[in-house]
């Protein structure tokens, strides 16, 4: 740290990462001001649901080259009142009505706040009365309860987008835009430190495919990303191509094929693409799913694949192809290979440790990872944690790049959860004089429950696929993933 006391802290985002960051900071009792800025109307992050149908996609070139979420023009003089911005910020929800967690509640919950045992009838029907999974509304309410206790809700500004964060002298200048009914209000606030907890599952990635944008233009709403999926009803009697072999592609293709509403078969682009490491490819073995290799081009309503086969009269193409990590409000922090370089332990921006990140990791024990990161960030800013020298922090990143590469695998904690949790706990230290959030030792039961939950999902797909094969009179077919 620079030696300058940190008394004013800004937190960007009120999803699970922002909620636990707020809690950890408040429990340190070391700060005069904590402010949380959330662009949605309430807490929850990606667990907030939307009832309105998402806006149609455009700007396919920028979605493909991961430049879609650029900065907006800031008024020359602030504060200011301007016309409402029409620039897409991709803040719409990725929730659909029947969405359930695909991870056991035990490894999802924070260490001091258990997730409700409320189970949906649908989950019970699929996994039994002790189903470990929870409906999305349970997670939304869980995060909301964490924010709205102890007066924390008074620290949060909703419908507020952080548009620019820049260091001016020893302070962080934060430019903000409040989304009003008929106009936008802009202003500036100043802080000693900033915690980025804005998540990286917002901006859809859609690969460049010849003819795709023309297909969408001719039939607006016909090209979607998985985050725009709102349930199977829209696709009744429609011919659908689902692109993506990982979790969202599996869920959507399976849901559509198992519903008997979509035209059969559902066409899934999976061949030659790696299935998700946790969940595998069993979902794509449904007898009403036909698997294909990559899409080569789209002509009219015909989707052509690289093996020379094609599907005609396609109504919808749904992409489960992941997200682009963007930080439009931090122009001086570059995103490279869909990760944020320059972070020590995925938390501390090495150039200036008054800029910290919570949630800059890949999937796996995510809420608990957020908690450990948030406590470390809070202890650093309170002056109760000591960081290694800059050279050592840089060496940690360089060694990790050598071991995992300079891409998405860099951010994956699996399989080294215990080592990572204990490293952060050691760096954060125990609460000073008993003040602050206490981190327990890593429990391997968390990882066991995490992995066993995946097996439950795979067993469900296997069971339902077997029943569907009997129904349609087809033998067992394994997807060539």
Image: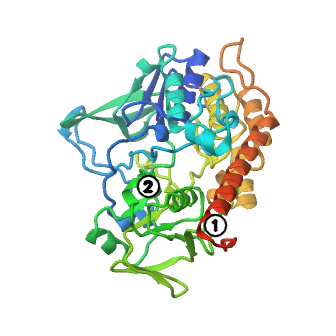
Quadrant of res 21: top right
Quadrant where the C terminus is found in the figure: bottom right
| x 59%, y 65%: residue | 245
| x 39%, y 60%: residue | 235
Mark 1 → mark 2, Cα distance in angstroms: 21 Å
Provide residue 277's location: percent of width, then percent of height.
70, 58
Callout 2 crowding tier (Cα within 10 Å): few <14, some 14–19, many ≥20: some
Say whether residue 51 is left or right of residue 445: left
Judging depth in this view, the residue of 178 and 202 nearest the camera is 202
| x 53%, y 18%: residue | 31
| Residue at which label 2 appears | 232
The numbered dot on residue 423 is none
| Residue furthest top as drawn | 433
Say whether residue 260 is left or right of residue 421: left
Judging depth in this view, the residue of 416 and 113 nearest the camera is 113
Provide residue 426's location: percent of width, then percent of height.
77, 31
Helix or strand or loop: what does disc 2 sit on?
helix
Quadrant where the N terminus is found in the figure: top right
Say whether residue 430 is left or right of residue 344: right
Callout 1 crowding tier (Cα within 10 Å): few <14, some 14–19, many ≥20: some
Judging depth in this view, the residue of 378 and 256 nearest the camera is 256
Helix or strand or loop: what does disc 1 sit on?
helix
| Residue at which label 1 appears | 469
Residue 321 in sight:
no
Quadrant of res 2: top right
Sequence-earlier tag: 1 or 2: 2
Provide residue 170's location: percent of width, then percent of height.
48, 31
Tell us which disc is closer to us: 1 or 2: 1
Say if 21 sits above or below 264 in the image: above
């Amino acid at each position: 740290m620079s030696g300058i006391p940190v008394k004013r802290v800004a937190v960007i985002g009120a999803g699970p990462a922002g909620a636990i960051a707020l809690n950890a900071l408040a429990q340190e009792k070391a700060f005069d001001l904590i402010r949380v800025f959330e662009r949605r109307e309430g807490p929850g992050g990606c667990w907030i649901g939307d009832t309105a149908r998402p806006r149609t996609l455009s700007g396919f070139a920028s979605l493909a080259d991961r430049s879609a979420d650029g900065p907006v023009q800031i008024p020359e003089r602030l504060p200011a009142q301007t016309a409402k911005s029409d620039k897409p910020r991709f803040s719409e929800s990725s929730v659909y009505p029947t969405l359930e967690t695909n991870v056991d509640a035990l490894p999802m919950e924070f260490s001091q706040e258990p997730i409700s045992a409320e189970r949906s009838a649908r989950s019970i029907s699929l996994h039994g009365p002790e189903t470990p999974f929870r409906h999305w509304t349970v997670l939304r309410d869980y995060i909301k309860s964490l924010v709205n206790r102890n007066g924390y809700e008074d620290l949060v500004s909703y419908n507020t987008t952080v548009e620019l964060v820049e260091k001016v002298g020893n302070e962080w200048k934060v430019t903000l835009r409040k989304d009003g009914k008929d106009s936008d209000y802009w202003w500036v606030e100043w802080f000693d430190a900033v915690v980025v907890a804005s998540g990286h599952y917002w901006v859809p990635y859609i690969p460049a495919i010849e003819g795709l944008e023309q297909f969408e233009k001719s039939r607006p709403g016909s090209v979607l990303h998985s985050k725009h999926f709102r349930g199977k009803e829209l696709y009744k009697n429609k011919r659908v191509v689902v692109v993506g072999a990982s979790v969202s592609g599996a869920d959507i293709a399976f849901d559509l094929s198992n519903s008997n509403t979509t035209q059969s078969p559902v066409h899934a682009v999976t061949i030659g693409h790696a299935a998700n490491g946790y969940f595998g490819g069993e979902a794509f073995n449904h007898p009403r799913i036909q698997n294909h290799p990559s899409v080569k081009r789209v002509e009219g309503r015909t989707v052509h694949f690289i093996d020379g086969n094609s599907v005609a009269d396609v109504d919808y193409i749904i992409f489960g192809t992941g997200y682009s990590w963007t930080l439009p409000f931090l122009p001086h922090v570059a995103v490279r290979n869909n990760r944020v370089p320059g972070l020590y332990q995925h938390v501390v921006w090495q150039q200036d440790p008054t800029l910290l990140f919570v949630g800059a990791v890949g999937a796996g024990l995510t809420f608990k990872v957020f908690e450990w990161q948030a406590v470390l960030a809070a202890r650093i800013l309170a002056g109760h944690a000591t960081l290694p020298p800059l050279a050592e922090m840089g060496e940690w990143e360089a060694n990790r790049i050598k071991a995992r590469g300079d891409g998405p695998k860099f951010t994956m904690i699996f399989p080294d959860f215990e080592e990572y949790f204990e490293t952060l706990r050691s760096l954060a230290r125990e609460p000073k004089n008993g003040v602050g959030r206490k981190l327990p030792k890593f429990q391997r039961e968390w990882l066991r429950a995490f992995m066993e939950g995946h097996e439950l999902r795979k067993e469900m797909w296997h069971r339902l696929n077997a029943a569907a094969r009997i129904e349609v009179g087809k033998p067992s077919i394994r997807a060539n993933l």
